[in-house]
Image (cartoon, rainbow, N blue to C red):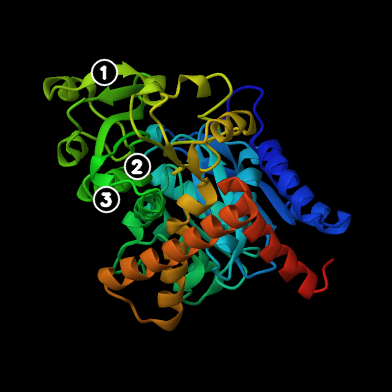
Amino acid sequence: MAQAGFNPFHMAQAQFDKVADLLDLDEGTRELLRNPIREYHFSIPVKMDDGTTKVFRGFRVQHNDARGPGKGGIRFHPQETVDTVKALATWMTWKCAVVDIPLGGSKGGVVCNPHNLSMREQESICRGWVRQVAKNVGPINDVPAPDVMTNPQHMLWMLDEFETIQGAKYPGFITGKPVGMGGSLGRTEATGYGVIYTLREALKEHNVDIAKTTAACQGFGNVSQYAIQLYTQLGGKVIAVSCWDEPDQKSYTFRKTSGITFEELIGITDKFGTIDKEKAKTMGYEILPGEDWISQDVDILIPAALENQVRGDNVTKISPRVKFVAEGANGPTTPEADKVLEERGIFVIPDFLANAGGVTCSYFEQVQCNMNYFWTKEEVLEKLDTKMTVAFKAVSELAKKKNLYMRDAAYVISIQRVARACKDRGWV
């Protein structure tokens, strides 16, 4: 996931340290908030289809739960590291705080590649993960959810294992479940739609008509797909999409200067977000190197893949025309690249604000499960729009009032809320 030499947790700590200095936090609070409260590392033995036993490494990191139960996804990825999980758990703390939902930050992962595993093997990993942490997670202390290369089926297997161990029904234990099995309508769209709700508000503030803008996106998984869908519904035009090609073990950029057709592209995409190159060519798409998404002559960039994608070595490739960056991924921009974006006056909607739609809707799912009453899709998306809009405006107003970069303003709000909760509890 992260490139050699890049440590996402150190990046998360550097971002925190910058704002801790701004807030003049005391030493005890700094030490508490810059490190996870708990970490679990464990092995998951799985009997493979060929009769052999393979041992997978799993993690669950709980960064801070002063404001409520931990919340955070579970990633399946062959290059997963505990430092990635620690960084993501940290960002989840700030994400829940910036949209003001009563949850803390956690994250989980397993070092594996679902592309190369049968459904039975994947089920065994899911159940094995739960068995290792069943005493340390649950609806009132830490609530998992899907993330990279995990889906509603994985969540349902995990829920079933947790309920089997506990001997009772706990639908609020995990979110991202299938609709009809405790899942919330609107959850699939939530993260991508949330990115566009905040982008819409940013464009309004700058008196920019969204229908006259163009964008390039990195990634074509769940987040990017629904961001593209809503953005194009509002009149915007996406001209380039970059995605990972598993068979080739490399990424490609699919470009159509007249604008991509979402329905057309989704029709040639597999469940992992890989676009069929040959079919795309017949539909008139140019196939370019994966990094070329960042150099497109557009108004908006939407990095919605993995962390460490906008870096010091490629930030200079960004077109002078780009005026907005909406971070759909977690930690896509390194501090080095962030300085360049700030100096250029590019308006950045930071990741833990832009992509907070997912955890917000997960919170809605948890609430619905706990009261055993479910809302319509329209209700869910309306509540989501309101929550994201209020959060964006609070960050934007603080940024203007204090003359802060948007990322710093978002951190100030989040860190102040979490630090206050820790202080009120008597932890510091």
Res 59 visible: no
Residue 329 or residue 269, whichever sits in front: 329
Q: Which residue is pictured at 66% across the width and 56% down the height?
A: 412
Q: Are marks 2 and 3 in contact (CB under 8 Å)?
A: no
Mark closest to the chain's N terminus, 1 or 3: 3
Instruction: Tell me the SS state at disc 2.
Output: helix
Where does the image place residue 46, in percent across and percent down from the top left?
A: 52, 42
Mark closest to the chain's N terminus, 2 or 3: 2
> Gap between marks 2 and 3, in whole Å?
10 Å
For marks 1 and 3, give the one nearer the viewer: 3
> Gap between marks 1 and 2, in whole Å?
18 Å
Where does the image place residue 379, in percent across and percent down from the top left?
A: 30, 73
Q: Which residue is pictured at 23% across the width and 50% down the height?
A: 234
Residue at the extreme left of the image, as rendered: 282
Q: State the image quarter where residue 156 is shown.
A: bottom left
From the image, which quarter does the C terminus lie in? bottom right
Q: Label 3: which residue?
A: 230
Dot 1 amino acid type: Ile
Residue 235 is left or right of residue 248, and the answer is left
Dot 2 amino acid type: Ser
Dot 3 amino acid type: Leu
Residue 263 or residue 292, whichever sits in front: 292
Q: Eyeballing the image, is 112 above or below 280?
A: below
Mark closest to the chain's N terminus, 1 or 2: 2
Q: Label 2: which residue?
A: 224
From the image, which quarter does the N terminus lie in? top right
For marks 2 and 3, give the one nearer the viewer: 3
Q: Label 1: which residue?
A: 287
Residue 358 is left or right of residue 106, and the answer is left
Res 324 visible: yes
Where does the image place residue 323, in percent across and percent down from the top left?
A: 42, 36
